[in-house]
Amino acid sequence: MWARHVKTAVALKQYKPGATRLVAGKAVLNSLLTRIPDSEFTAIQPHLEFAVFSLGEYLERAGRPITAAYFPNRGICSLLVETPDARSVEVGLAGCEEIIGLTLIGGVDQLPYSVFVQVPGEGFRIVSGAMRRIFAFMPEFTRMLVRRLSIHAVGDSQNAACNRLHSLEQRLAKLLLMVHDRLDTDDINITHDFLSKMIGADRTSVSLTIGEFENRGVLARRRGFVNIKSRPMLERESCECYQVFKAFNSELGLRT
């Protein structure tokens, strides 16, 4: 039902990237930074610093002041809610389509989740104080971020229903599809242990499900990697929730 309501939401005006934009000699691949007008990129460019995102690194911790906003070029970060008894669940993903630190646009300078590098990569960072100051000079960028907040609200609602109503197999397939959407390869650098943390299940159950997917020809596994062999089959394994997220892929610059 959600998918019928959101399909009309992807036809908004988007700026088409022209010549490659550079920051300190590094190409800009983040879709937000490639789609803003030239005048707004000129405003933010001097404040951007190149950054490398290492596997397992925490960019931000829940409940602490946001130190910077991040614009990934490559790689994927997981947004994790972690409990005092060492349990965790993934509540979102951020790749080349995203800004990490989105809540700054609403004046909220703490995140309710931690930001963990799931797939290593690189991109750009801007200290939070500078990010807040230049919003006034970037109206189109601000509009895009408010739009992202709306998309996240849809995703959060769908995830809440998904975690309550759908099976481990369906949720794992959905997660793998969403990770795949943010990569330019069929190889996903991820462990069974971390997959279990992301979907809030035990490692043994996740490993058994991955094994079942492999037996059906959906994917192949090797140490530290999962290779997507048949995306259509993986989509059939997923619940309908994935289609809600997929409806926004074109707008976000992700795999369609």
Image (cartoon, helix red, strand yellow):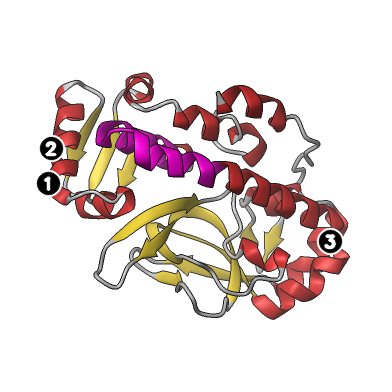
| Residue located beneath label 1 in the image | 204
Instruction: Tell me the kind of residue under disc 1.
Output: Thr
Front one among 199 and 165:
165
Vertical side of 201 occupied by 247: above or below: above
Crowding around mark 1 (Cα neighbors within 10 Å: few <14, some 14 to 19, many 20+) is: few
Q: Secondary structure at mark 3?
A: loop
| Residue located beneath label 2 in the image | 208
Label 2 to label 1, Cα distance in Å? 6 Å
Whether residues under marks 1 and 3 lie with C-beta atoms below 8 angstroms apart, the answer is: no
Residue 20 visible in this rendered orientation of the protein: no
Quarter containing the C terminus: top right
Label 3 to label 2, Cα distance in Å? 49 Å
Residue 108 visible in this rendered orientation of the protein: yes
| Lower position in the chain sequence, tag 3 or tag 2 | 3
What residue lies at 59% left-to-right and 41% top-to-bottom?
154
Report the span colored magenta: 155-180
| Residue located beneath label 3 in the image | 138
Vertical side of 128 occupied by 185: above or below: above
Label 1 to label 3, Cα distance in Å? 48 Å
Any magenta on residue 173?
yes
| Lower position in the chain sequence, tag 1 or tag 3 | 3
Whether residues under marks 2 and 1 lie with C-beta atoms below 8 angstroms apart, the answer is: yes
Front one among 64 and 94:
64
Question: Looking at the rendering, which quadrant does residue 134 occupy?
Answer: bottom right
Instruction: Tell me the kind of residue under disc 2.
Output: Leu
Q: Position of residue 108 (x, y in %)?
A: 65, 71
- 3 or 2: mark nearer the eye: 2
What residue lies at 38% left-to-right and 35% top-to-bottom?
174
Crowding around mark 3 (Cα neighbors within 10 Å: few <14, some 14 to 19, many 20+) is: some
Q: Position of residue 66 (x, y in %)?
A: 57, 76
Crowding around mark 2 (Cα neighbors within 10 Å: few <14, some 14 to 19, many 20+) is: few
